[in-house]
Structures are given as structure tokens and as C-alpha cells.
Image (cartoon, rainbow, N blue to C red):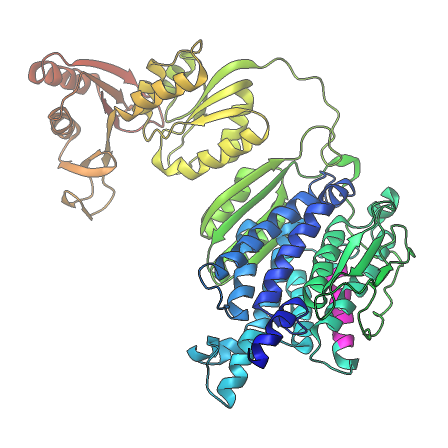
Amino acid sequence: MTEASRDAPRRRQLPQNLDAVAVRAWSALALEALGQAREEIDAINVYPVADGDTGTNLYLTMESASQAVDAVFTGLEPAEPALVEVVRAMAHGALIGARGNSGTILAQLLRGMAQVLSADADAGDGDSHRRDAGDGDGHRRASDAHHADGARLALALGRASESAYRAVAHPVEGTVLTVAKAAAAAADAAARDSRDPRDCAAVARAAYEGACAALDATPGQLAVLGRAGVVDAGGRGLVAVLGALVGALSGETVRRRADVPGVVTAAVVTGAAGGATGITGAAASTGPTGFAGAVAPAGPTGPTAPPVATEPAACADPAPDGAGPAFEVIYLLEAEDAAVDRLRGRLDALGDSLVVVGGDGLWNVHVHVDDAGAAVEAGVEAGRPYRIRITHFGLGDAHTVRTQAPPRERVQRGIVAVVPGDGLAALYAEAGATTVPARAGEPPASGELVEAIRRAHAREVVLLPNDAGLRHTAAAAAEQARSEGVRVALIPTRSAVQGIAALAVHEPDRRFDEDVVAMTSAAGATRYAELAVAERQSWTTAGICQAGDVLGLIDGDVAVIGPEVARTAAAVLDRMLAAGGEMVTLVLGDAVSDAVAEHLEKHVRDGHLAVDTVLYRGGPQSALLLIGVE
């Protein structure tokens, strides 16, 4: 056995430098620690919203990060990936899986660390990621790609804190940001003063101790914490994550004593050769929750963390009388940096607790707002939002309590539809639908759709957007309504005539799922067309049109260009009926005369036997002519 192979187990048990294996151990230990502390952290969650989910959000965020780390190792054993690959995977996993305000900040902390820990690898060439890189500078870069010493870990923790502060629109002291800043300051001091600046374990231990001290000071910095007699929940979670880092680098296990709530205890569970040392230690309870202590060291410790001021700082307490925003909105966003800068300004005006993390084209957006739809629409304007999650804080929670009369009983089922024109609105309303007007050039916002769903006051709602362009808006509205306890089915109707077909088969006494299937099938079996007047010369799928030409659009594409309405409509009908059909629905705008309507009805009757025709007047604001063929 070679000397290197004999040393390998020892290095994996007690790595003094941060490498890929240590990061994997850190992610697993952090997940375990957050899992054990989840209920405790949830219970002390009072800021920024007392919704009792900080522990759960941190756990789910770390779970995503840990899974991403494990995926990097898959198929490589016994070989190891480079440190840069693992820290980037950890940060990316946290970013795409971040939950809540605390989870989003944790993702940014990990991203900040990854930026420093991968910096030298980016500066090197492609070979810097290989174990067998050459001598000289190539060897140094390879070492940097696979290992980080204590000094680099301290720099990484400093970058993490700085990036987290920048990600939060209005940083507040006494929160996880303060704890992260204290951890970074303590780590920096340890790296500067340590006898061996390469020792990551000493730096991690100092960061943990600094975080513990800062956490105990949070009730004196944030009034809402002081009134509740608790430390910051997000900061408590970060302490658990840093304790896991100590464990991964030194073999010490930082755990909470079960018999004394809030007290941290630590034990060295394995020695350098894998045997138990029996050394244990407990934290001194100097603050209201007892997080001020340090783990029992395996060797010389780093310097004590700088003192943390306990005088209350100016901060943004929750709004009085629980008058804060009602919804939490989170989504991933693909967007350019400039668009994200504009998005920050727009979302900041809509609500509070704004955190935007990420970079390189992928972002995680978190905000508390009253109009969740507007927050999603802002994301649509900035780029491509997806994995949209909207959570209603709920009646009765400390953030949204308002005096109000008991709600009236809900009906079982309702229909909400976007309709162009007063005539169609009356038709839909007669069928029992709650309508949202579609004005030319002014598509409804998702907030309008949510209000319509609320007006329907039903336990179950079928949503008919009747416009392909409203797909994302309708989806956001449906998600927001679901968060309020309404069962919503979105049928992706692209035209009002498809909505009419869906309404025709709607049976409110049928099971909801069966009704939705029947309505969706009817809408999907209806081909649709629209007539419009060209405003200028343009290239189309049917050729070049001139201003004033009548365009016949079938399923959204220009199929016919004609000189006037009657002839163009007849040509469109012939094309659509060539594929078969049993019923034609015509929705006539105000500009279509009765004579044209009679001509089209006769055209169908004479040219297509056994096809019925139904005519409706769309009224003002409706399209020139809508055609549906079932």
C-alpha cells in the first residue's frame, strides 16, 4: 500500500482543507442538522412573516443543494470531481430549489462562496480540473481546483455575506444577514491570526462561534424578536449549516442538547485514526436562547469572534395591525442582468421582503405582495419565469389579520371567462359565467382574473382565458386562487368561440373532473378563426397584405387575404369546413351588417349540407368576426 493510499481514509475523516468530499459531507450534515432543527426553527419564525415555515424552507432548499452535489459524484467513484464542480452544483441546486425568504438568502450565500472557491479554476485552463495536471503553475491550479485552504474559505464566507446583502432590497439587521456578516468577520480574523492559515477547520470553527454570538444578539437588534423572546429563525438555520461545516472539516458533531432548548453542544465523534476521543463540550447560555457557546475544539482554536453590538438597530418591523402583503411569490427567472435590475425596482414598489438571487442568466425571485399576478407579470416582462409558487399567508396569521365580516357560503362551481364585447359578455353571463372584459390593446391583468374568481365565490372554478396570449396570465391567476383554497381548472381556450363550445357542454351537477374533461374536449374540437383589417403593408403566411385588406386568420395564422368581409369570410369558412364540421358559430362585430350575416349563413347552408349555423352579436369592443367550427 502506498503512503498516499494509507493517508486517504484519514483525509476523508478529518479533512483540514476543503475539497469535494468535504463539501459533500457538509451538504449531507447540513441537511441532517436542518432536518433535526426544522420544527424548532419553524416555531420561532416571527420575522418577516410569522408563518412558521422558515425551518421547512431552509430544509427544502438544502435538500435540493445536497441532491445536486450527490449528482456530481454519480458515476465517478472511486474518482472524485473537482471542488469547483461540486460547489457550483451545490449553489445551483440551492438556487433552483430555494423556498421562502430564508431559503433564497441561503442560496445566495452558497452562490457567493462558490464564486470565490471556483475563482482560481476559472483563471486556469481546462486542465486545471484534472488530478493529473502538470507541474509548476499547472499543479498549483489543479490544487486550487480540488482544494481550498482556510484563507480561501474565509474569503468565500466574506463574499457570501456581501452578496446576500446585495440581494436583499432593504437589508435589516438582526436577521440571517447579521449572522452571516459576523461569521465572515470571525472567519477572516481566524485566517489572519491562525498559526496555520491553511487550516479550514479552525476558520470554520471561528465562523460558527461568531455566528452563535451574533444569533444571540438578534433579539436586541430586531424589536419583533425581542417581544417574542426568540432569536432570528433564519439565523438559527445558518448556525446549523455552519455547525455542519465544522463537522465536515474536523469530525466534530455540533448538536442541540435535547433537554435544554436552544443550547448547542458539540462532540468530537472520531479521532484522526477513526477512534472515539470522548471529548465533549457544551455551549454557555449567555443569551436568551443559549446560542453563544463554542464547540469543544480538537486542537488550538481560532481567536474569539469580534463582539456583536446588542443595541437595537433601526429596522423594518412587520407592518402594524398585520397589514402586510397577503401573498408570497417565488419563481425562477431566465433574464438578462439589465432586465433584472428593472424588475427589482418594479417589484420593490409592489411589496416588501424582496430578494433576487442568482446570476448568469438564471435568477430566483422572492417577494411579498398583495397583487401576486402583477409580480408574475413583471417577471414575464423581464424574461421567462417558471416554477411559479404563490402562497397566501392566510386569514388569521399574524401578517394578514384584518377585521372583516364572516364570509358568505360559497357555491359549488363557477365559470370565469375573458370575453371581448358586451354582447358576448351577456351571452356568457346568461350561461352562468363571471366575465372579465377583454379590451382591444389592453389585455386583463392576472389580478383582474383573480378578482373575478373571487366574485364567482365558488369552491370550484373553471377558467376560460379565450386568448392564447393570456396563457401565462391565466396560469398565474389560477395559482393564486388555488393558494386561497379554490380548486381551479384552467382550460386553455384560445378564442371566445372555443369558450362557447365549452359552456355548451358544462353541467354543474357533474363531478368536477368529468365536467372539466368534457369542456376541454369540446373546446379542443372547435377550430377557430377571426377576421381583422390590416393596418399597414406586411408579410404574412398567406402573402403580402396592404393596409385595409381583410385578413382571415385560422388558428392564429393568416390563411386568406381578401378585399372585403363577406368574400374573405366565405373563403375562410370553405377552408375550415373542408376538413369536416357539424356546426358553425359566427360572432359578428358591430361593423358586420345583417346582410353580410345572412349571406354567410346562406353560404354555409348551400355549400355544406347538414351543417348548422348559429349567429351571435358580439357588440362593441368585439372582433370584426369570430368563426368557430365544431
Position of the N terminus by quadrant: bottom right
Measuring 62% from the left and 68% from the top, which residue is drawn there?
A: 12
In this picture, residue 170 sits left or right of residue 556:
right
Given residues 130 and 530, the one toward you in this image is 130
Q: Quadrant of residue 419?
A: top left
- Does residue 133 show up magenta in the picture? no
Q: Is residue 188 magenta-colored? A: yes
Q: Position of residue 61 (x, y in %)?
A: 60, 50
Asked whether residue 352 is in view, the answer is no
Q: Residue at x 83, y 56 (%)?
A: 265
How many numbered marks are there?
0
Magenta region, residue range: 178-190
Q: Position of residue 94 (x, y in %)?
A: 57, 54
Looking at the rendering, in which quadrant would you find the C terminus?
Answer: top left
Question: What residue is drawn where x is 86% and y is 60%?
Answer: 281
Q: Is residue 368 above or below residue 196?
A: above
Q: Residue at x 82, y 73 (%)?
A: 301
Q: Viewed as shown, does residue 182 lie left or right of 54?
A: right
Farthest residue in the top direction? 509
Q: Foreground: 309 or 444? A: 309
Identify whether 208 is placed above or below 442: below
Residue 479 position (above or below residue 242) = above
The kind of secondary structure the magenta stretch mainly shows is helix
Residue lying farthest to the bottom in this orientation = 136
Please indicate whether residue 134 sits to the left or right of residue 32 in the image: left
Place of residue 24 in the rendered image (x, y in percent of width and height, measured from the top left):
59, 61
- Is residue 272 visible to the viewer in this orientation of the structure? yes
Q: Residue furthest front?
A: 1
Q: Position of residue 321 (x, y in %)?
A: 79, 35
- Which sits in the foreground, 322 or 515? 515
Query: 190 or 442, which lies in front?
Result: 190
